[in-house]
Image (tube, grey):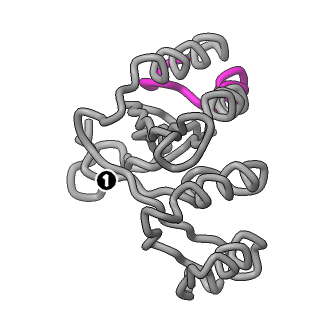
Amino acid sequence: MSYRIEYQWVAFRVAGLPLGLSEDRFIVAVEGGDNNLYEANSGRRARSWEACMAGTRAQVMKQAVYFAGTCEGGDLKPHGRDCTPESYIRRIRRLLDDTKDTAREGRWSPRLRVPRDHPAVAELCERGLKPREEQRYGTTCAVLDDVPAEHLGAYFELVERYAGTLHAWSWFEVYGLRAS
């Protein structure tokens, strides 16, 4: 049976006021991978960074509770070790508490990748943002990688509206983070 290992966590705080939002937003990036996948060249476990949680503090904590549930069954192991759901939730809460407006390293950018018939695509088009189409694993996806600063507040509002159907990795790209 395989399980997911999380190695490192970074949170980005996005000031809400300049975007016309009532609260700050957070993007939590996690470096992780499956325990049974290895890099061909080095033989070490494969891992990568991706956005895993996004939204207001309350929304991120709700997502953390969801992911923490997988610790109970052994499907998620921070640092490759068993962890209680409560410990995982505390880890994310502390991460948000310690987040500054700019992270020491790394960056994030909006990048939406969803099936082309997802309702978020129509809402983006109504706002004048035109996603491009790309083929991904035999499916046509709508991709939007360039969100002008004046539309960023509306973008975060869409993230909130569709948080129940789209995970953070569908909305954001993270890069420039040091691998473990």
Badge 1: few (under 14), some or many (20 or more) residues near its Cα, within 10 Å? some
Give the left or right position of residue 175, taking residue 77 as reference.
left
Q: Position of residue 69 (x, y in %)?
A: 72, 26
- Report which quarter residue 7 is drawn in: top left
State the residue at coordinates (23%, 33%). Answer: 104
Residue visible at 60% across and 81% down in the picture: 128
Q: Which residue position is annotated with label 1?
A: 175
What range is drawn magenta here? 68-82
Would residue 78 be counted in the magenta stretch? Answer: yes
Q: Quadrant of the N terminus?
A: top right
Placement of 82 over or under 124, stated as above or below:
above
Q: Which residue is drawn at the image coordinates 45% and 21% (left, top)?
A: 95
Q: Is residue 22 magenta?
A: no
- Dot 1 falls on a residue whose secondary structure is strand
On screen, residue 8 above or below 116: above
Q: What amino acid type is highlighted by mark number 1?
A: Tyr
